[in-house]
Amino acid sequence: MSAPDEIRSVEIEPPEVAAARARVRRRRSIALALALAVFALIFYVLTIVKMGPALFTTRGL
Amino acid sequence: MAYIDDSRNFAPTTGEARVEDYFALLKPRVMSLVVFTAFVGLVLAPGSINLFIAAIAIFCIAIGGGASGALNMWYDADIDAVMSRTLNRPIPAGRISREEALVFGCALAIFSVALLGLATNWVAGGLLAFTIFFYAVVYTMWLKRSTPQNIVIGGAAGAFPPMVGWAAVTGTISWESVALFLIIFLWTPPHFWALALYKQGDYGAAGIPMMPNVAGEASTRRQIMAYSVLLAASGLLPSWLGMSGLVYTVVAVAAGLGFLYLAFRLLRAEDGVPMRKAARALFSYSLSYLSVLFFALLTDNLLARLGVFA
């Protein structure tokens, strides 16, 4: 395939479609970030809950 | 094993799946029933559990159920593209690729099992892992396309959640949790066969060997009747095992009789439109039957804890 053919085969996306794609991608990234934050928070709280009141006992240290 | 030609083409993926598409992969409607029955199992179990850990357990069971749904959609994308009911799912609609669904499902499965095991105990974690395996591998990959008994055996996957909830509190499997399992297990065949009776064109087009396509309508209706008798009887197991009181027993008897009546009406209905109407009525009733039964168990347990009827 010659160079001009390659150039012609590239589909140019209308700006509104590109903007919509960017919006969808952004929402997906935010959702993923939130999921990871919740995941970290769950493990943090779970660790404290599993350790129980002993976590706050400093006697004997 | 497979009845379906896997070479069927799907719409090309756009590469921009929305958050809602990933949520749809979790089969949220199925998940709501899984969460509810697991919650009932967890509340009914003897013993105590920290509220936060209980919430985490329910969350894990929900995510595990969602993982099963995503793995099911990954494997069944070819037949989903044929049936009107499933045509708009994210994979056949071209919004998510099969590979993305597979990775998503596996990641959620590992996460939910590990977290449940760490938060509660490994009996519950192991049961959840087995549930996901049973639904994704035993039912979806093996039974669904190879035998008309697919729903009967595969129904076990949907029946495990209350056992997982129970095990999250007690760390064991007991007769009481098996009773909850049995109710959902015996409910599944009449529920899905009623759906298949009025949607059999869909299943037939997809090549899924559902009972009406393979054994015929008359045989399916007889089997629905038989399972309905077993279901109505199993609904009384919690009363018999002393898990529940008067409220549940009254509800279980009334709901069971209603189920038997609709199953009998379907058995006696004339072929064609009357049969399809009767099948639809039984399917709609079966949807609320399970919720009503488990809600009655919950109410009964709450009343007992509050000392009513004591």
Image (spheres, grey):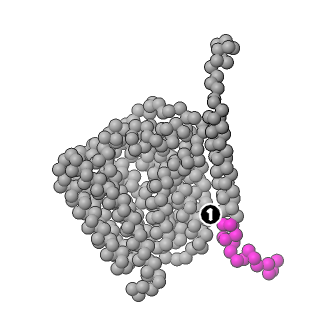
Q: Quadrant of residue B213?
A: top left
Is residue A49 visible to us here?
yes
B69 to the left or right of B215:
right
Q: Main secondary structure of the magenta part?
A: helix
Q: Position of residue B223 (x, y in %)?
A: 25, 54
B228 in magenta: no
B134 to the left or right of B201:
right
Q: Quadrant of residue B76?
A: top left
- Relative to B64, is B300 above or below? below
Q: Position of residue B89 (x, y in %)?
A: 48, 43
Label 1 environment density (alpha carbons within 10 Å; few <14, some 14–19, many ≥20): some
Return the residue at label 1.
B118
Q: Position of residue A55 (x, y in %)?
A: 74, 74
Q: Secondary structure at mark 1?
A: helix
User: Residue shown at 51%/48% (left/top)?
Assistant: B24
Quadrant containing the C terminus of chain A in the rendered view:
bottom right
Is residue B230 visible to us here?
no
- Relative to B156, is B180 above or below? below
- Relative to A8, is B300 above or below? below
For disc 1, the chain is: B
Q: How many marks?
A: 1
Front residue (pair B27, A57): B27
User: Residue shown at 41%/77% (left/top)?
Assistant: B300
Q: Residue furthest bottom?
A: B310
Q: Which residues are magenta?
A: A45-61
User: Residue shown at 43%/68% (left/top)?
Assistant: B177
Q: Residue furthest top?
A: A2
User: Residue shown at 57%/35% (left/top)?
Assistant: B14
Q: Position of residue B135 (x, y in %)?
A: 45, 51
Q: Quadrant of residue B185?
A: bottom left
The amino acid pointed to by label 1 is: Leu
